[in-house]
Image (cartoon, grey):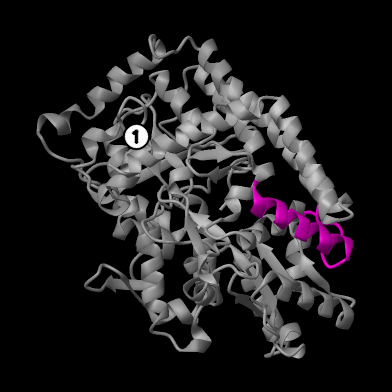
Amino acid sequence: MKSLNKRASLALSGVLAAALIASGCSSGNEGAASSSGEASAGGSSTAKAEGGVYNLGDKPLSFSFYGHYDWYTMPNWGEDEASKWIKANKKVDVVPVSSGGNAAQKLSTMIVSNELPDVIWMERGADVEKLREAGMLVAFDDYLEKYPNLKKWAGESTLEMLRSPDGKIYQFPNWYTTQPNGNAGYLVNKKIYNDLGAPKLETTEDLYGYLKLVKEKYPEVIPFEGGQKAEAITVLSSAFAENHPYDFSSVAMLASPKGDQLASVFEDTAFREGVAFGSRLYREKLMSADTFTQPLDQVEQNIVTGKVAVYAASSPTEFGAIGNSLLKAEDPDAGYIMIWPVHKEGLDKNKIFTGSYNQLGWNVSVITKKAKDPEAIFAFLDWMTGPEGQRVIMWGPPGLYWDGTDEEEKPKFTDKFTSDTKGRDKLMNDTVNLQWVGNTVYVDNAKMKFESTLPEDLKSWETKWQSEITWKTQFNTTEYVNLDPAGDSPEGIVAQSVKEIYEKAFAQAILNGKSDEDVYAILDKANADAKTVGYDKLLAYKTKKWQDNRSKLQK
């Protein structure tokens, strides 16, 4: 899945704040938003007055939908098999509102002109809270009992984490979960690995020795693909401490837990040792030389053509699945495997977590007070996140790739599901950008249950490694979500400065570090520079947010 990077998120917060001021909205003066709120209340008054619920499909429902991302263009509703079925059988039409490639400007314009869409699909956090404080969003609390899918599948602790400071829920989560998921880990070129005798690859020193052997025996191959901006080294930092996913070493978090405080990432031992290890790989030409400049499609090309021996990433399975299929088509002994995360000698391998998952999942949908019938929209989103909605939006209408359900409401996949993989994959690709309220537990368990019935040669490559390795090695980071300050706040300004210091120091340490001591000196200087711009203030802010999250999860 795609998501905004930190820089874009901070910038959006600043633009959003300016737009809200220009529109005259604040928590004490809703302005135009209050009048639209009266209209929306009237829109669902009939159902409330009768004490009933909105029955999807009884009458037409049309609403506008805006994806708050530069990259996002919503597919035309009703053109793919899934949304065509929903439009015909549930009488729902979704009208797209495009960002035009400039999400920040688009939302600002809509706010100032008082022409908000009915639904906004966006990142959790500061921007949602700004809209809420301005009185522009509809709370969902009155709907949760009437439409039970979200409450049932997300669970109370996830809903508690979604509550705003006023105690209400305004955010409908996407790909929320109550069980591990994720793909972070290590991809290994099967052909090269077996040709070299399938040596032990358990510790960081095993990995180092293996990469040296690859360089010697396969000079045309990249021993260790660093990905974009040496992302692989951030993932690799997880090998140097127990219960330490790469998030704690990443530019996205800019902090690492130390006792009951969030401390400087530059002082974190796992991060420092990971960067030093990465610098050693780089200066010994064991890692891709252009990792800080190569585009993502070059990384993909390296993987799918088999020019890489080992690749570590936050989600290597997408390229790995493609590469595995292409390479095996040429040579049955070729392809990719995944290995259990490597660890520093002396650490417990079962406490090494390459990646993470959190209960809240990815992003959220909010319903604005411009919606004429917010309850009807919520009812649709709740249906969509439930079993039937997930079956349709994931695998198409009933009778095509699935037909009926079992006793657990899991789809009964048809023979066409495995025989027409081209058509099935096209359908799933067509609907991926319509999956706004994904239910991870339902989808993953349905997929796994079906896969368990297949012979080995028909099982999905990705599903195999998810079940055997990646899902078992993802750390629950729910308590660390929503730590970022608003971009226009004093802490947000500090965060932007620290991010720039981090990125510069990380690159310098990898590219220019002549020794471990040299790397540590670069990180020490970055730490001092960060404190000069107010890093301690940012860490105090993040610590408070973290402790607030922990309190919510303990309720």
Looking at the image, can residue 100 be seen?
no
| Percent position of residue 324, x then y | 66, 78
For the point 37% across and 61% down, the residue is 441
| Helix, strand or loop for disc 1 | loop
- The foreground one among 513 and 306 is 513
Which quarter of the picture shows residue 453? bottom left
Is residue 16 shown above or below 95? above
| Percent position of residue 389, x then y | 33, 56
Is residue 98 shown above or below 427? above
| Percent position of residue 140, x then y | 29, 34
- The foreground one among 198 and 11 is 198
> Is residue 277 one of those drawn in magenta?
yes
Q: Of the residues shown, which amino acid type is indicated by label 1?
A: Arg
- Name of the residue lying farthest toward the left: 50
Position of 489 with respect to 133 (left or right) is right
Dot 1 corresponds to which residue?
163
Position of 182 with respect to 396 (left or right) is right
Q: Quadrant of the C terminus?
A: top left
Position of 438 with respect to 205 (left or right) is left
> Is residue 100 one of those drawn in magenta?
no
Position of 149 with respect to 1 (left or right) is left
- The foreground one among 219 and 248 is 248
Q: How many marks?
A: 1
